[in-house]
Amino acid sequence: MQLYLDLLKKILTNTIYQDPTFPDPAAEHGISGYRDDIREIGLDWPTVAHTMVGRKRLDNVHWAVETVLKDGVPGDFIETGVWRGGVCILIRAILQAYGVTDRTVWLADSFEGMQVTGVRPANADAADVRRLGGGRLPRRVRVGAPGERWLGRRGGERPGDRPAQQT
């Protein structure tokens, strides 16, 4: 099982084919092409990989999900700020590897980036703002009941306007 999950992490970070990073914002930090040490800690912005969080953070998610299962903590999982979905793919794979079928993995994303508040965190830089989509969030978000899907701007409606058709 661990070999399968380790291979999946290599696939999600694309350390197998070593896709290059986007030149901006990584170029501001002197990163170009592919660097395994940078991909490991999630400091680049991969062109193809399913996640930008890096191997170390995937290892942390792996540990956290296994700890939740081992300790019998009830409930579902959620990934907020999904990008290409690599973390939720890993969570689903871990649950499947352990034969867990009674938990849901929820995905949430504004598809608009982060809200600009005018307050600059000490560790933020211009590259972070660009990478996070320019700093825009929908004005309102409505969370539906379990099993309901809500259409956002990609569906032609504002978030929370109406539930999507059940499939």
Image (spheres, rainbow, N blue to C red):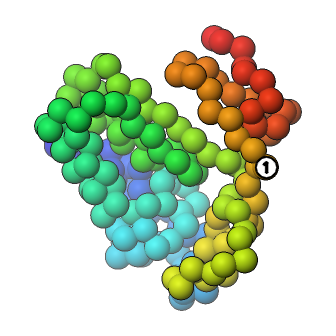
Q: Is residue 83 left or right of residue 51?
A: right
Extreme residue in the left direction: 70
| In the foreground, 116 or 167 | 116
Most extreme residue toward the right, as rendered? 156
Residue, x 57% and y 41% (percent of image)? 108
The one nearer the camera, 29 or 91, is: 91
Q: Is residue 146 visible?
A: yes
Few, some or many residues within 10 Å of mark 1 (<14, 14–19, 20+): few
Q: Residue at x 74, y 33 (%)?
A: 160
Which quarter shows the N terminus?
top left
The answer to whether any part of residue 154 appears in the image is no
Q: Secondary structure at mark 1?
A: loop
Task: Decide: is 160 above or below 27.
Answer: above
Task: Specify the amino acid type for callout 1.
Answer: Arg
Residue, far top: 167
Give the image quarter of residue 100.
Answer: top left
Q: In the image, 67: left or right of 161?
A: left
Q: Position of residue 157 (x, y in %)?
A: 84, 33
Examine the image and state in which quarter residue 144 appears: top right
At a point 27% along the width and 56% down the height, the residue shown is 59
Give how far across and how far down residue 119 sits, in percent.
66, 78
Q: Quadrant of the C terminus?
A: top right
Which residue is depicted at the point 46% across and 73% down?
Answer: 43
Q: Of 45 and 129, which appears nearest the observer?
A: 129
**Percent coordinates x, y for residue 139 in the rendering:** 79, 49
Residue 132 sits above or below residue 78 on the image: below
Q: In the picture shown, does residue 102 fall above or below 133?
A: above
Pointer 1 residue: 139
